[in-house]
Image (cartoon, rainbow, N blue to C red):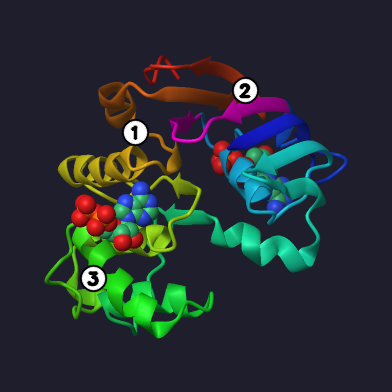
Amino acid sequence: MISLDNVTMQYKASTRPALRDLSLEIDKGEFAFLIGPSGSGKSTFFRLLLKEDKPTSGEVRVGDFRVDKLPGRKVPKLRQSIGCVFQDFRLLQQKSVADNVAFALEVIGKPSSTIRKVVPDVLDYVGLAGKADRMPTELSGGEMQRVAIARAIANRPLVLLADEPTGNLDPDTSEEIVDVLDRVNRRGTTVVMATHDRHIVDSMRRRVLEFNLGRLVRDEDHGVYGVG
Ligand code: ADP
Ligand code: ADP
């Protein structure tokens, strides 16, 4: 589903590469944690998958997309197959819970009949049935992240990228959010989650990819957070 082949990303010639000669594969349906200190290349990895940056060398694939060679006109299609959630939720503050999800489907041209059906389904799926008409300011952090996940999965993406999705949440709420991501994964969506949350990684025992200084330094199938 995701494959990198000898990928190097050097933002500026004079600096150390953000990723060096990185090769890895993540299969369809996998759940992988991406760990490593700040500056180790985790966000760069996500940006390359989304074609927000182009690698200096190497090959990047997501599903059937050869991302590093993808022409600009096809980038929107790529991004529609990748759902994203972030530490800071990134909800539209002027729109209700339902409209945040609906808007994401409108901008990619889904018919309103589909949107009317999918929005309540996904809100139910993430545990927000009954909160459709709330505004983001009326929600807890955990609820905001549920909205962000609903929005990210509404189009049934191939891959869900979560960049420190529990970074602003207390431990109990973090567990609930990871539980939602786990359910999304068990329905077939490949999930990659960058995190500094040792407790979550240790309790899930899923694949662990550890980056350090732009290199993949550990890749374990049922890994723990480790000494890092
Ligand atoms: P992480 O997400 O693990 O914190 P990043 O991928 O953000 O790591 O950063 C990896 C390295 O690349 C760091 O040294 C960072 O300073 C550098 N870097 C990231 N983005 C840019 C950019 N847009 N321009 C120049 N250097 C960057
Ligand atoms: P359930 O059987 O739990 O009620 P449904 O099959 O009715 O779930 O799905 C509810 C909605 O949630 C679907 O319409 C779909 O949009 C969304 N959904 C569920 N699982 C996923 C998933 N893994 N990836 C993307 N979307 C999903």
In the rendered image, residue 153, in percent from the top left (x then y), is placed at 39, 57
In the rendered image, residue 82, in percent from the top left (x then y), is placed at 53, 54
Q: Secondary structure at mark 1?
A: loop
Taking depth in this image into account, of 191 and 56 the one nearest to the observer is 191
Q: Which is nearer the N-term, disc 1 or disc 2?
A: 1
Q: Residue at x 18, y 64 (%)?
A: 128
Q: The residue under label 1 is which amino acid type?
A: Asp
Visible in this render: residue 185?
A: yes
Q: Residue at x 69, y 54 (%)?
A: 51
| Numbered tag placed on residue 216 in the rendering | 2
Secondary structure that dominates the magenta span? strand
Mark 3 surroundings within 10 Å by alpha-carbon count, few (fewer than 14), some (14 through 19), many (20 or more): some
**Mark 1 and mark 2: span between their CA atoms?**
19 Å
Q: Is residue 10 above or below residue 6?
A: below
| Residue holding disc 1 | 197
- Judged left or right of residue 15, residue 174 is left
Image quadrant of ligand 2?
Answer: bottom left
In the rendered image, residue 185, in percent from the top left (x then y), is placed at 36, 40
Residue 170 belongs to the span the image colors magenta: no
Part of the protein shown in magenta: 22-35
Residue 26 belongs to the span the image colors magenta: yes
| Residue holding disc 3 | 120
In the rendered image, residue 56, in percent from the top left (x then y), is placed at 84, 41
**Mark 2 and mark 3: span between their CA atoms?**
40 Å
